[in-house]
Image: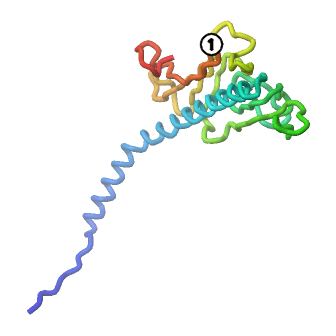
Amino acid sequence: MLSARVNRGFTIVELMIGVALLAILLGIAGPSFATWVQNTQIRTMSEAVQNGLHRARAEAVGRNAPVRFELMTTLDNTCAPSTTGRNWVVSMDGATANCASTNMADAAAPVAPRLIQARPSGDGSRNAVVAASQSSIAFNGLGRVTPVPAADITIDITNPTGGTCAGSGGSMRCLRVVVTAGGQVRMCDPRASFNGTSEGC
């Protein structure tokens, strides 16, 4: 005689234990995930600024002509350079009050501002905050900053929405983009400046 197999599901007690364990795990992982998201916004903005600076320098060398990287308040035709601007523009001329222009650098009849690239602040980094030592950086045909700055140009990216920087005891891994007079562009961690790591500023 064959014995019948009994299909047994979960009991109410087992389901309640599973739900309780899931709630505990989410309670533990939730704050870490939120911190990770806020830190990702800092990283995204820092990489975007660094990429924009690299693009401006490469275009200056490739065209053998001055090219500007500018931090802007907006990307419409009310734009103005700002050391706290979260939008940026790469152009051959100053783009002030002309950021929405369709006059591109490769057009047949080039007219200022001869735009090359622009990036809005909302692209993956809506909470990131920028603080730069200057709003406009121009590279010459040799890839050097012109006029020559008295010190390295710094662009600090933080995220007050997520908290304070790790260097001040907080949980945010704030970053800095540094541009030397020779045109070298690099991203670094201000917190690591005293421990001799390659990430240090």
Residue 195 picture quarter: top left
Q: Where does residue 106 sit, x and y in percent of width and height? A: 82, 37
Left or right of 34? Residue 177 is right
Q: Residue furthest bottom?
A: 1
Count how many numbered circles sit on residues in the image: 1
Q: Where does residue 118 sit, x and y in percent of width and height? A: 73, 36
Left or right of 44? Residue 144 is right
Above-or-below relation of 14 to 93: below
Q: Residue furthest top?
A: 150
Tell me what residue is drawn at x 74 percent, y 30 percent: 90
Which residue is more in the foreground, 24 or 61?
61
Left or right of 140? Residue 190 is left
* Color style of the picture: rainbow
Residue 194 picture quarter: top left
Q: Where does residue 27 sit, x and y in percent of width and height? A: 38, 46
Residue 120 picture quarter: top right
Q: Quadrant of the N terminus?
A: bottom left
Q: Identify residue type, mark 1.
A: Asp
Q: Where does residue 52 sit, x and y in percent of width and height? A: 67, 31
Left or right of 97? Residue 120 is left
Residue that numbered label 1 is attached to:
152
Element on which disc 1 rests = loop
Q: Is residue 49 visible?
A: yes
Tell me what residue is drawn at x 68 percent, y 28 percent: 58
Q: Is residue 138 visible?
A: no
